[in-house]
Amino acid sequence: MVSIINNWKIIAEKYHGRFRNILATSPAFIDPINTAIRRFELHIPMYGENLIFTTSENHYFKLEHRFKKPINFNIEIYPEDFFEKVSKAFGMQEIEVGNKAFDDRFIIKSSNPEITIQLLDKKVQEYMITSNFYTFNLSTENNEAKLLIMPYINEENKEELERFIVFSGYLIKQILELNKN
């Protein structure tokens, strides 16, 4: 726990951000014995946006970013497993980017395939192939655009954590650029 706190503090300072170590109360149905949980927030300013990374003792690490303006496309990416392979055999529609290693690993659904392929450039594909992702979702509902990414990150590894933060900044910059068109 100490190394995670130190890593988050170092990264916050390096990127002119803010680290918050919060002792919160968890509902009793989550853990009836220990209702006090530790939650971490890392706020990093990048490209005119405030990226917020969070984790806690009972929730996975994630980036949940709310854009200042609606995004004119939706994307959902998740790991391909046995059920998706069967679904694809029966005609499930998905987007492919033309990189076999990426296309075999992920299911991609989008409201705009052309923009999605532009967003998932070689840099994004390479990062996603070499990292483990649980979910990637970009959507706009009720005029509010939100990006949710849940990677499997070893937060004790500062380089791995920082690599994800830099990747997130790059990705958000790309989304903002593509949304201008």
Image (cartoon, rainbow, N blue to C red):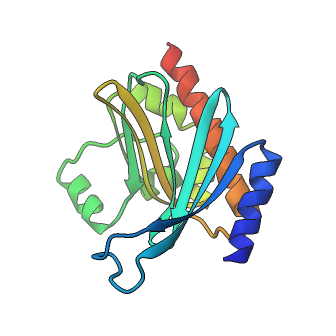
Q: Quadrant for residue 121, please give it.
A: top right
Give the image location of residue 139, x and y in percent: 36, 35
Residue at 78% of width from left, 44% of height from top? 15
Q: In this view, does 32 lie to the left or right of 127?
A: left
- Of residues 22 and 8, the one nearer the viewer is 22
Residue at 45% of width from left, 40% of height from top? 147
Which residue of the protein is positioned furthest toward the bottom in this rendering? Answer: 33
35 is higher (above) or lower (below) than 119: below
Q: Quadrant for residue 25, please give it.
A: bottom left
Q: What is the tally of numbered marks visible in this picture?
A: 0
Residue at 35% of width from left, 80% of height from top? 31
Residue 122 is at least partly visible in this image: no
- Of residues 34 and 72, the one nearer the viewer is 34
Q: Is residue 15 left or right of residue 22?
A: right
Which residue of the protein is positioned furthest toward the top in this rendering? Answer: 181
Residue at 46% of width from left, 75% of height from top? 36
Residue 172 is at least partly visible in this image: yes
Q: Is residue 44 left or right of residue 102?
A: right
Q: Quadrant for residue 153, please give it.
A: bottom right
Which residue of the protein is positioned furthest toward the left in this rendering? Answer: 90
Which quadrant would the N terminus be assigned to in this image? bottom right
142 is higher (above) or lower (below) than 96: above
Q: In this view, does 122 lie to the left or right of 83?
A: right
92 is higher (above) or lower (below) than 154: above
Give the image location of residue 161, x and y in percent: 68, 59
Give the image location of residue 128, x and y in percent: 56, 53
